[in-house]
Amino acid sequence: MLPTHHILDTDWGEPVNTFDRPILEHTMASKSLILDDELLAPYVMARVDFRSTFAHRERLDDSELAERCAKLRIMGSFTPFACLAELTNGDVSKLPYEYVHAVMGALRVQQASVERQGLIHRLLDLGHVEEAREEIDDLMRVAGDIPSGRRLWLLANLDNPGVLTPERIAKVVRLDPISAATRRLVVAALLRQGQPRQALAQLAVLKRMNDFTESDRQIEAALGTQLGEAQP
């Protein structure tokens, strides 16, 4: 992945390093710790070309680059943001399935890590619902019945009304009653179940929590019209 140009061609603008003035160590440390929106600054300093390889003259395609980024993540135990930025044209929320699937297995030992939950969200976005449900089941098996896991479960089953029983929906609320995100998911679940009055009641809770968005107002107004009830 080393660039074709030289790694040492940077003009640091620092004094010459000598025994009586050992400036080099300080300079290297201070430069390498400057993040500037990039959590892997050494890659940026070295100007690594993630699509290059010594093995072949051709540059890596997106699938091969996804595999490389995944290997860096798994073996390095950190997220290679510079590699992901190259892979997603700067929008790391649009991770391809190849990367998500490869990293998922490695993250199973990390139980309820934020990164793992984010990748499950991405699986859902990509339409891999069954795989996401399996990951959620494993997440709750190793981490317990945590609120974030239950929210993921609810999100993954919004279009699966057979499992969205009132008891299960109520359990999600009980685990995290003051979470606006949980309440909005419950509203979505209740609407899919054809329970507009209960959904309206959840929106009323959001209003009392002072976390009421324009989207919430629109849903409230539509439900009020549907039920023939004027909303304050």
Image (cartoon, helix red, strand yellow):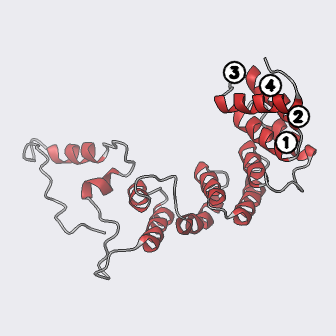
**Quarter of the view holding residue 226:** top right
For marks 1 and 2 on the same chain, the one whose residue lies earlier in the sequence = 1
Quadrant in which the N terminus is drawn: bottom left
Q: Kindly report the distance in space between the C-alpha atoms of the residues bearing marks 1 and 2.
A: 7 Å
- Residue sitting at x 70%, y 37%: 181
Q: Are marks 3 and 2 in contact (CB under 8 Å)?
A: no
Q: Secondary structure at mark 1?
A: helix
- Nearest-to-viewer mark from 3 and 2: 2
Q: Residues within 10 Å of mark 4 (few under 14, many from 20)?
A: some
- Residue sitting at x 29%, y 54%: 44
Q: Kindly report the distance in space between the C-alpha atoms of the residues bearing marks 3 and 1.
A: 21 Å
Of 62 and 170, which appears nearest the observer? Answer: 62
Question: From the viewer's perspective, is residue 73 above or below residue 60?
Answer: above
Quadrant in which the C terminus is drawn: top right
Q: Secondary structure at mark 3?
A: loop
Which residue in the structure is indicated by mark 4?
204
Residue reaching furthest to the top: 232
- Nearest-to-viewer mark from 3 and 1: 1
Q: Kindly report the distance in space between the C-alpha atoms of the residues bearing marks 2 and 4.
A: 10 Å
Residue 190, numbered circle? 1
Q: Residues within 10 Å of mark 1 (few under 14, many from 20)?
A: many
For marks 4 and 1 on the same chain, the one whose residue lies earlier in the sequence = 1
For marks 3 and 1 on the same chain, the one whose residue lies earlier in the sequence = 1
Which residue in the structure is indicated by mark 2?
198
For marks 3 and 2 on the same chain, the one whose residue lies earlier in the sequence = 2
